[in-house]
Amino acid sequence: MMLKDRVKKAQNNSVFGKNLYKYVQFCSWARWYPDLFLDLIKPETGGITLHPDQRIYLRCIMRFVSLYGVFPRGYGKTYDEVLAMYLTSIFFPGIDLAMTAQTKENAAELIKDKHSEIMKHFPMLENEIKGKPRFSKNDAEVNFKSDSKIDNLANAQSSKGQRRKRINIEESALLNDVLFQDALKPIVEVPRYTVGKLGVVDPCELNQQINFFTTSGFRGSDEYQRSVKMYNGMVHLNGDMVLGSSWFLACWYGRGSTKSQILKKKKEMSPVAFAQNYESRWVGSADHALVNINKLMECRSLTETQIFARSDDEYYLGVDVARSQNTNNNQSSVCVAQVKRNKDKTRIVSIDIVNIINIPNIMNFTAQACIIKQIKQRYNAQGVVVDGNGLGAGLIDQLLKESFDPVTNKSLGCWNTINDDNTPEYPEESEKILYNLKAQTAQSKIVTNFIDMVDSKRLRLLCSKQLNDFSVSEQDDFDNKVAPFLQTDCLFEEIANLKLKQLPNGNVTIERVVKKMDKDRVSALIYVLWYINEFCKDIYASSDYDYTTLIN
């Protein structure tokens, strides 16, 4: 008997067969209008009514080959994203989906949080879930009666070799294209086959779909270029879709923070941070950028900060000075650099920025000098470079005097400069450790040295972490465990806001794109990097090296 005849006979002999075409029509309708399907199943009380922008979001992710979404904090993008994954798992039997994030822990936490919200708003979806979802610190797995599955992966090499039918990438702005092409893109290499003995690849299905969701990042990055490419693909009807909004849209519909709360955050946050997290603007200089933003992102590889010196490791401090009664003005910054050398101490392998400390700018120079000397003692720093121009001269004067701990009243010592003839308060007892930098005289060298450090990846910075990535004990010790990571985020923003400027004499300098944004952390960083490269590169080159050559 021909297959066509067998199907026709089955349709005539069963209730299901007689209504098969209606089921096909309904499933096609639900796939095309997922928001209307949710309207059908939402409860009379306790559910939610989707807003127009959420309906567009759901329809786009179910209809287009690839979606790039750039949304602000509090928009609800992750809720919509996970909700769409649940609907896909129901409508496409046997499909395997994954959410990827910076870490598996972060992805697992996102799925877990949104699962409870979705079940609360659409309790009928719980009937589609097989067994009890499994959630732990590192893993999340939700199985469906349709034989579909949702789990989590990391945006890392550890995901290489995994296979899923579709993936959603969270915080894609932190992703670099090399990692994406090598580890993430091949994950969706194998398409879904339809269920049954005649299982085939449906040519009308969105096989190998990869969606990207993020708050905005930095112009010139791989992801910025990807969003532009997908925007052009959308214009030319290539199957791509790009969506985005600022905080106004979600606020208008009553999602997230209120208008007054967000405007308050705008006053408290840096312009770059607010533009990225709430205005969905890609920031930084795309043309004549100081450094390649992708290479700078690769430098963020350190996973833990250091509060004190480790054994006999080598540390240096860079200090940029500011003093103002206006709390919105510049701040004094201290950059702690740890030098890593090869076994025979002849070559610098890397310079790790293990901590960045901001000193309240309303402190006078005497108080600032005490804090800097305390930091020097914590890390047993072998050199401290301070910008001695302008306001820095006042701090230099205080560092040349004996300082006392304001709590214990113990002496913090008296310093001496190693590169000029300034006279300390106690010349015979002073430690010759302070380098009085006149930055204007070496600006071109300082800038080019920093660019070389980033390009060669010898500079290593603390990685990017969200607040929920820290344990409760770490958050309790905020200043030592959490603040250094946040300060590194601010440093990253400051660097992205700088562009390279060519001077008429052939030298180069740096210029801010957004004038309101400071560059104090950058200054402290580039000063200490230059100092290490200029004077400390060969200190341990031989056992008979005379350290006094640095002083003289």
Image (cartoon, grey):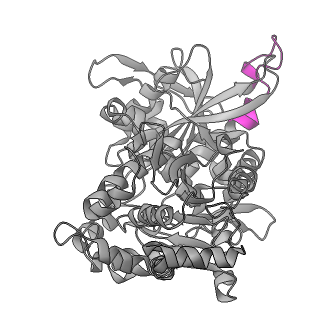
Does residue 257 appear left or right of residue 503 in this picture?
left
* Residue 64 in view (yes/no): no
Could you tell me which residue is drawn at 51 percent across and 14 percent down? 429
As for residue 546 lying within the magenta part, the answer is yes
Residue shown at the point (45%, 68%) measured from the top left: 516
Corner quadrant of residue 92: bottom right
Report the residue that reaches farthest toward the left.
Answer: 45
Give me the residue at 35% from left, 51% from top: 113
Is 126 or 386 nearer to us in this picture?
Answer: 126
Q: Is residue 247 above or below residue 344?
A: below
Residue 368 placement, left or right of 193:
left
Q: Is residue 548 within the magenta segment?
A: yes
Tell me the quarter of the picture where residue 364 sits: top left
Residue that appears at 29% across and 67% down:
256
Position of residue 544 relative to residue 97, above or below, is above
In-front residue for pair 216/353: 216
Residue farthest to the bottom, as pictured? 236
Q: Residue 135 occupies which quadrant of the picture?
A: top left
Q: How many marks?
A: 0
Q: Tell me the quarter of the image containing the N terminus.
A: bottom right
For the C terminus, give its image quadrant.
top right
Residue 196 rendering spot, x and y as whole percentages: 63, 61
Q: Give the extent of the magenta segment.
A: 532-549
Q: List x then y, in percent, for residue 178.
A: 74, 54
- Where does residue 268 sit, x and y in percent of width and height? 32, 61
Percent coordinates x, y for residue 28 in the rendering? 51, 79
- Vertical position of residue 386 compared to residue 341: above or below: below
Q: Nearer the viewer, residue 287 or 106?
A: 106
Can residue 505 be seen at all in this image of the molecule?
yes
Q: Quick check: 530 above or below 13?
A: above
Magenta segment's dominant SS is loop
